[in-house]
Amino acid sequence: MISDQLYALAFEYKKTKLWRMLWDVQVFAVKLSDGRIGYISIMGGGGSHCALGLYIGQAGLDSLRCIAEADQFRMSPFEFHENIIRQDCLQCAFEGKEELSKEELEEARAYARANGIRISGKNAYPQFVRYKPSCLPWPLQTQQEQEDLCEALSAAIHMAKLLEGHRPEDLGIRRIDGGADEIVLLELQDGAYAVSKIKALPRQPMVWPEPSNCNEIGLASLKKIRKSGTYECEIIQFPDPVQNGPGEAPCFPFVFLAVNADMNFVLPVSPVKSYLDAPEELLNFFIDALRKEGMCPKELLVRDERTYAFAKGFCAKLKIPISIEKDLPALDEVEMDFVRHFSMSEEEELAEFVSLIGEMMEDGIGLGELPPEITEQLEQVLQREDMPEDILDQVEEILCRGTQGRPRLAKSDFKTVKPKSGQSYVISVSLGTGCYRHIQISGKSSLWRLHSAIIQAFGFDDDHAHAFFMDNKRWSKRDAYYASFLENGCRTTDSCTLDKAGLCKGKKFLYLFDFGDEWTFQCKVLKVVEEAVDQPVVIKSKGDAPEQYPSWEDE
């Protein structure tokens, strides 16, 4: 149960709007009552995830640096993911009521009613969570965590007062990702905060776990197997978390990817949660997998120092050469498939499934030769109203071919326009599950015109900035177009037509409206039509659009 003191400080902190004065990398510190140093990061300056994070000690500060240095364009997907989930902090975040558990929501409302507070606005409910490395955020578990967060919020409230009329630089607050050698420190002395500075300790080098022992019986059996095959290996973390029980924070397990490059074979090694504390478990799973397959490597090529530290003892006992290599093509291919599998949406998985069945039928395999579950799944796809038309068309064609003339289903009545010469696109624009619009628009139209069509289709007021991210990555700098009035030096939406934006059937891109609320629309080109239209037209609409400015209630 969250204390009244923590709730009171959270609501008081929210009034300061400190996120308008500091960026998340402009860190300051507080000396906690027991002498520990906590580093405070204020999140929300970019318009999303308004929160205060308390990172305690050197380990906490280093985890914050990992997040600040994460670069999805420079790092592999696995390395980027690990940097993000290495976060080690306590957070007071402000969320929408749908993000809170039933218990959290009832508790927040009870406090607000008892103290005459009206909870209103977007993301107005305080939520208190603990981030542990390699785990999803979880509710606070101890009284000490609540007390630490109270001290952090008190310090942040005081920092907001210090910054009134000043810039962070005036107080000596520097970016931790900019080489700051000192960090501003607040320390409560005789009921008042004293301001000083402490040295910003450099990031500590990573010490990778090394198994101290292993299954010696299993190792002895491997010595009897003839060595063969070069294995390309790396330790990675699963992108999806797992949970053993309702009382445990979901965590991201580790797996030892071992690919026999000569056979293009992936060794089935079971994942573990305890690699950091007990690497022996993962090593024993690796040994067991080799024994079951009757294999013993003649050479190991590993991606990095972590994997080398993990496997070098194993290799020494079996007299197997091991070396670090950056160019591992067989491993790269497996990892790409791995990332693709976990990053695919349900719609993409269905599209791939339908495409695979279609290819099989083209190769001469009849639908009746496939398991009946396949036909049932295809029938179920046809019943779904949230599927794009191109997928439904493919499914109908497969079923028609499989049943020798099965009648095609009737199409919905679409609004039509007189075709013109030129090219147009049918673009599916989705805002959450079950809410989308299919818009047909001329290829000669600008991205700004598409922006206007989307806003009108969803009934929003065009009173905020917008941007298109053509590589489908929000806030990406690679292929982005912004509203011309922003004057940020980027390419503008009124200067690029759809024909020049690289659109093609199946291409996905993001449309972002209102940089404060960050309404994010998923766009996908369903069809390229060799006909133009004078004006954009909504040819299919599903689901009610959410309110642009909802009136939030505390009940």
Image (cartoon, rainbow, N blue to C red):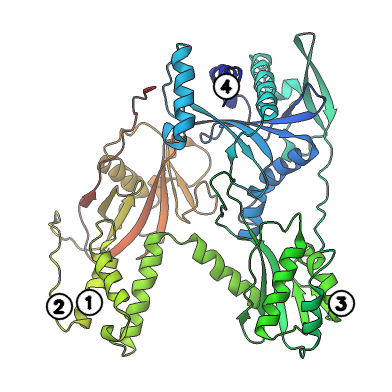
Q: Is residue 162 above or below residue 79?
A: above
**Quadrant hosting residue 362:** bottom left
Distance (Cα) linking label 3 and label 2: 64 Å
Name the residue type under label 1.
Leu
Pointer 4 local density, CA inside 10 Å: few below 14, some 14–19, many at least 20: many
Q: Earlier in the sequence, mark 4 or mark 2?
A: 4
Residue sitting at the far front:
217
Q: Which residue is mark 4?
A: 10
User: Left or right: 538 with respect to 494?
Assistant: left
Q: Which residue is mark 3?
A: 317
State if disc 2 and disc 3 touch (CB < 8 Å): no
Looking at the rendered structure, the secondary structure element under dot 3 is: helix
Name the residue type under label 4.
Ala
Distance (Cα) linking label 4 and label 2: 62 Å
User: Left or right: 323 with respect to 26?
Assistant: right
Q: Position of residue 19 (x, y in %)?
A: 58, 27
Looking at the rendered structure, the secondary structure element under dot 2 is: loop
State if disc 3 and disc 1 touch (CB < 8 Å): no
Name the residue type under label 3.
Lys
Let me know if residue 505 appears in the view: yes
Let me know if residue 117 appears in the view: no
State if disc 1 and disc 2 touch (CB < 8 Å): yes
Q: Which residue is mark 1?
A: 399
Pointer 2 local density, CA inside 10 Å: few below 14, some 14–19, many at least 20: few
Pointer 1 local density, CA inside 10 Å: few below 14, some 14–19, many at least 20: some
Q: Earlier in the sequence, mark 1 or mark 4?
A: 4
Q: Earlier in the sequence, mark 3 or mark 4?
A: 4
Pointer 3 local density, CA inside 10 Å: few below 14, some 14–19, many at least 20: few
Q: Which label sits on residue 406?
A: 2
Q: Earlier in the sequence, mark 1 or mark 3?
A: 3
Q: Position of residue 231 (x, y in %)?
A: 71, 79
